[in-house]
Image: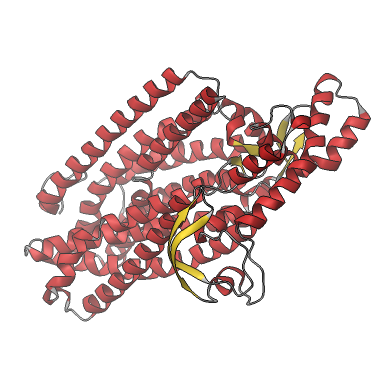
Amino acid sequence: MHSLQTVVDLSRWQFAATALYHFLFVPLTLGLSFLLAAMETVYVTTGRKIYKDMALFWGKLFAINFALGVATGLTMEFQFGTNWSQYSRFVGDVFGAPLAIEGLMAFFLESTFVGLMFFGWDRMSRGKHLLVTYMVALGSNLSALWILVANGFMQSPREAVFNPVTMRLELTSFADLIFSGDAQAKFVHTSIAGYVTAAMFVAGISGWYMLRNRHMELAKRSFRMAALFGVFASIGVISLGDALGFIDGGAQPAKLVAMEAMWKTRTPPAGFNVIAFPSQKQQRNLYEIQIPKLLTPLVTRTMDTVIPGADEVENQAMVRMKDGIPAVLALKTLSADPTNQPALAQFKAHEQDMGYALLLKRYAPDLRAATPADYQRAARAVIPNVAVIFWSFRVMVLAGFSMLFYLGVAAYCSLNNRVQDRRWLLKLAPWLIPAPFIACEAGWLVAEMGRQPWTVYGVLPTWMSVSTHSVGYLVFSLTGFVLIYSAFIVVEAYLMLKFIRKGPDEGRLAAPLH
């Protein structure tokens, strides 16, 4: 039993490590591709050479980030078959389609056009090259769309049914899978977060140039475009984040419990915990600072809706575990005799709660002999790691509002041609470059750790999703991935700093500026 838990934990750590490393590259690719397209659009429409210089210089940095993003992303998809084979078997009919389309987007559309964008400046007309740049931006963002469609299904699985004969989930509507509220909100939120990341990246480097009186014309115009681009993106990412929280609050009450460290169901309107130090073991906050009556309208858009706390979520989970046991027992009968109609009818009557019974099976292998203590342990497992999710959420929100404030001030000063006189603003810019990356990583933790203990929420528990690897194998592969991906980060930092220090006058990847 302990060995299985170790395999689950190590498999999760490996996927988390590779995903967090990879996600350092993705947001900048998503945002910088459209910012490059905007710069080139101004060049094509006005003919002003400075905007071509901007597109070429920032394109070099985009190329470095893009290449390493592809390298770190390749292993992500293979892990579904290596470390999560039971998950892949269970949801392959649903998960395979968006994953295959993402591969086509990434390796055919995106990668084909990115070569033309880098090396086609002297081989195509301005209009055709601009079209290629937009295709790279579109391909990058569409690639993210299909990943987030697949992830949206894991968060809110409403577009598939479980076949008790094949023991697999089967897709019922591809259109519903694509246009699910969770998938679309996540896609827009993630994409716009990438635009904020690119804005802070360009503004930070441009501010650094202006402080040293280098490449002033390019730096001032880049800073202005980044600030304006970033202001609108920041407003969008905060608005979409609020919408996504509203969706997740209804679909995943346990995640909402963790985000707000709400152990007890409160009489509405509930207060909002600004600061809290949660104790998972004691199921209470050791210390908290609360704004009264704020949480309910934020989450429900009403003043009288009850938001379930951990106590209510756990009670509901125990009820669903008991109701799901007949479905799991019926599956055992159907595996031996798929034509058994009484067993099929029993399964159909209880299939909505099957996942909760499978979760209980982790603590009571013989479900019919499950004790109250088994039920309580399984119910407590429904609540994810509250401290990590609570603070990750607040780090993300704080970073988002801080960047909105900075970019708003930066845009105002830039539009009034005062930015070069505001040295404090320029000095702050490079230090804020990590802020969007930290916010994106924190958001990923909220989304993915908040889904635990499920790989497919309410349907497939994480403990049942892993492959049957040895602990030694997982330790070896996890160590290898961490070392390799750390090397990628070092390479990215070295190349980025090298080309930033050189500036736009040296080391071009594309055609000479003429």
Write down the quadrant of residue 14 in the picture.
Answer: top left
Closest to the observer: 419 or 254?
Answer: 254
Quick check: can you spot residue 32? no
Q: Is residue 390 left or right of residue 383?
A: left
In the image, farthest residue toward the left:
213
Q: Residue at x 75, y 43 (%)?
A: 353
Q: Is residue 389 left or right of residue 53?
A: right
Closest to the observer: 23 or 502?
Answer: 23
Write down the quadrant of residue 495 in the picture.
Answer: top left
Q: Residue at x 18, y 71 (%)?
A: 425
**Image quarter hosting the N terminus:** top right
Write down the quadrant of residue 235 in the picture.
Answer: bottom left
Q: Residue at x 14, y 61 (%)?
A: 208
**Image quarter hosting the C terminus:** bottom left
Residue 501, x across and y down, in percent: 11, 50
Q: Is residue 97 left or right of residue 122?
A: right
Q: From the viewer's perspective, is residue 487 above or below residue 188?
A: above
Q: Is residue 387 left or right of residue 301?
A: left
Residue 345, x across and y down, in percent: 90, 36
Residue 348, x across and y down, in percent: 85, 39
